[in-house]
Amino acid sequence: MENWNITAEFILLGLFNHTGAHQFLFVLVLIVAFTSLVGNALMLLLILLDPRLHRPMYFLLSQLSLMDLMLIFTVVPKMAVDYLTGRKFISPTGCGFQIFFFLTFGGGECFLLAAMSYDRYAAVCHPLRYPVLMSWKLCLSMILGSWFLGAADGLMQAAATLNFSFCSAREIDHFFCEAPTLVRLACADTSVFEYVMYICCVLMLLIPISLILVSYGLILAAVLQMCSNEARKKAFATCSSHISVVGLFFGAAIFTYIRPKSYRSANHDKFVSAFYTIFTPVLNPLIYSLRNSEVKGALRKCMDLCTALSLD
């Protein structure tokens, strides 16, 4: 196949066609995305306004909501515009920005979830030393480190992917630009890059999930040694929401990035990508708000204030 100029545009084939069933699914995705935006924005607002939530645990949670918000903005608006207008083109520059921002928020979330597991370990296993083990300085360092590592991975993969020469078949069988999908269109030998990308993905996923498993192993051991049933229930309630988020996010990411190449298919990749870019972000605020009494208390306080203002 002939090489094509770097200024030529890619064509995103998208997630849906224009059948009745797919139109219904498209509307459902928009509803879920809007719910995710509202839920995560509300979580950010509650943590910002309620002094009781000005603690490291909730500051980490606010960053999770921010990353989920930005992840939705990176993928869904372009997908929706393409579907509604039928214009499915994206420039190489736009594709590079999508790869960069997607990996910045997605990769950063991997390390942020590991930081949140350490926070739960310090709170459950060493409650008296918690202010020392989870100081604001350490909390800020972990947050900045999560953003930096995600951005570094995104910059590296975006720059390396767009450095290849692409062929005349410029259709991307996806609803947004993702490095593994884009590399398949390259004319050059990409085996070395794919191997390096695979190693990076393994490190980005397995290092955080290993830290998370160690943290929750220590938490489980500590909880089982507690004499009070009430203390056990409180500890499990505090951690179960985080474990749910971790399982959903890492399960989908591992399926996408660590699965052997021979087992991949475009339809599976699109479905799983939709799950962790659109559906997982809406679950995070729901899980944390429903399982956390302090967040529910802050929400009730906010609703009571809004009701009082409307009556005035």
Image (tube, helix red, strand yellow):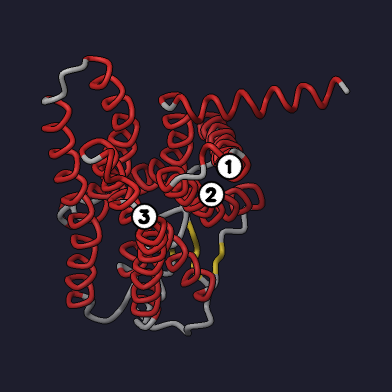
Q: Are marks 2 and 1 in contact (CB under 8 Å)?
A: yes
Q: Residue at x 49, y 47 (%)?
A: 62
Is the residue 132 above or below the residue 310 in the image?
below
In the displayed structure, 258 sits above or below 200; it is: above
**N-term mark: 3 or 1:** 1
Residue 177 position in % (x across, y down): 44, 62
Name which residue type carries label 1.
Leu
Q: Are marks 3 and 2 in contact (CB under 8 Å)?
A: no
The quarter in which the N terminus is drawn is bottom left
Q: Amino acid at mark 2?
A: Leu
Q: Secondary structure at mark 2?
A: helix
Write down the quadrant of residue 165 in the picture. Answer: bottom left
Image quadrant holding the C terminus, namely top right
Instruction: Give x and y (percent) for residue 284.
Output: 43, 37
Q: Is residue 30 visible?
A: no
Residue occupied by mark 1: 37
Residue at the extreme top of the image, as rendered: 229
Q: Residue at x 31, y 52 (%)?
A: 132
Say if 155 sits above or below 276 in the image: below
Q: Which residue is mark 2?
A: 69
* Left/right of residue 181 with respect to residue 79 in the rendered view: left
Q: Residue under circle 3?
A: 135
